[in-house]
Image: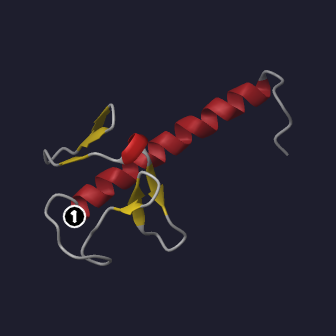
Amino acid sequence: MKIEGERLIFSTGKELYPNNGIIGLSPKLEVYEGYDGPIWYPEIGEFDDTQTLTPLELIELGLYMSERWLDFTMKITKEQAKGGDDLS
């Protein structure tokens, strides 16, 4: 998967355009794009070929987002080590 601007490009070639490049996960593990639009997959929504992700695409998205959260955590950890604000 790669991101070009606000375009997510999956290894399958499918493309999604989340508002502001935002991908989110609800407390119920529902996937959203932007600030309020669901990314449909068969368990939670109607079938729409442009917005429905296959199980493999969902795994690809989950792995990508896990990496992004790890990058974020490492950034904050490095800033903390440099004497940044107390995050406790």
Q: Residue at x 62, y 34 (%)?
A: 74
Place of residue 62 in the rendered image (x, y in percent of width and height, measured from the top left): 39, 54
Q: Is residue 46 above or below residue 74?
A: below
Q: Quadrant of residue 81?
A: top right
Give coordinates of residue 66: x percent, y percent.
47, 48
User: Would residue 64 be visible to someone looking at this image?
Assistant: no
The answer to whether residue 21 is visible is yes
User: Is the N terminus in the top left, top right, bottom left or bottom right quadrant?
Assistant: top left
- The kind of residue on which mark 1 rests is Thr
Image-based side of 18 in relation to 69, left or right = left
Q: Judge whether 88 appears above or below 47 on screen.
A: above
Position of residue 22 measured from the top left corner of the image (x, y, whole percent): 43, 46
Q: Is residue 41 above or below residue 23?
A: below
Viewer-closest of 77 and 18: 18
Location of mark 1 (residue): 52
* Residue under the image location 40 percent in, 63 percent down: 31
Q: Secondary structure at mark 1?
A: loop
The residue at the point 46 percent across, 69 percent down is 29
